[in-house]
Image: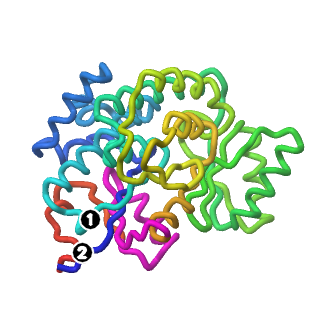
Amino acid sequence: MNQVPVGLVFPGQGTQKQGMGEPWRDTPSWELTAEISTATGEDLPELLLHTPGEHLRRTDLAQLAVFTVGLIAHAEAVRGGALGGPVVACAGHSLGEYTALVAAGALTVGRAAALVATRGRAMREAALAREGTMGAVVAAPYAEVATLVSEIRTEGGEVWIANVNAPGQTVISGSPEAIGEVGARAPSIGGKTISLRVGGAFHSPYMAPAAETLGGAFRDTSFAPTHLPVVANVDAVPYADHADWPALCVRQLTSPVLWERSVRTLTGPLGCRRLVELGPGRTLAGLVRRIDPEVEVVSVDGPGAVLARPVSER
């Protein structure tokens, strides 16, 4: 068998949809919903099976739903031997970083679930206190988007880079007025701005109150001193032994998600030749293909994908 080094990647908020748990409800790993319900006080089976899509857009509920499905997908992929090689590192996009920390052995399911619940509530409260939004600038080079954002901020607009997702896709965050101004000027740099239906200006200074709340929650959370490397969103650096994950996760709330660089860390220094996306949807697989077309990437978004043999095993 020709096995290759594998990296696991986990999606974030925005991949949720009504009935997202249905494909997994008859799998052995569905029992994780009971553990997460106990840790968070939310009814995860109800959330994953019956909650209307519009209600599921609520930040705190969306984050718990995506986190839980990611863990179930990971557990089933491990149980079914569907990863196709030795796992050498993990990474997650925004919320997905918490799922990655569990998969890497840094956090227990219960501790991570409690943090995700606190994080989601705090982000929702911060967004309700200060109106903000996000937009995706597509087609324009990152450097030119960053320059445009800096110019508008110099003029008094409140807008920041939130995600550097892939070549030609940069997400911005801030006030509705400033996001609109970026949209108006984006054609001058060859880009177009797509409004995102989100609950607030995430990964920007608008989330400072949420970061303070989350920091308090981390004071009561212990991490395993040694675990698989996890590539952090805030600097695209892999951390394994005795990392200051509380500081990294708190900083993430007000800092950009450096996803393009994170993927390059996985496929470059960490040597991953296969990336497995675990959780709802196939958003990350699409981004990975744009970042590194040479790496093999698959999505485990349902039990059928677990049953399919990896390309490297054929």
* Residues tagged 2 and 1 counted as in contact (Cβ below 8 A): yes
Q: SS for tag 1?
A: loop
Can the viewer see residue 16 in this picture? Answer: no
N-terminal label among 2 and 1: 2
Residue at the spot 23% in from the left edge and 68% down from the top edge: 84
| Quadrant of the frame with the N terminus | bottom left
Identified by mark 2, the residue type is: Gln
Q: Which residue is mark 1?
A: 86
Identified by mark 1, the residue type is: Pro
Q: CA distance from mark 2 to mark 1?
A: 7 Å
- Count of marks overlaid on the render: 2
Query: What is the basis of the colouring in this image?
Result: rainbow
Residue 178 spot, x, y in % from top left? 76, 42
Please report the bounds of the magenta region as a residue range: 269-296
* 135 left or right of 56 in image: right
Examine the image and state in which quarter residue 211 appears. Answer: top right
Residue at the spot 18% in from the left edge and 46% down from the top edge: 24
Depth check, front residue: 74 or 271: 271
Can the viewer see residue 45 in this picture? Answer: yes
The label shown at residue 155 is none
Depth check, front residue: 167 or 295: 295
Q: Which residue is mark 2?
A: 3
Q: How many residues crowd mark 2 within 10 Å: few (<14), some (14–19), many (20+)?
A: some
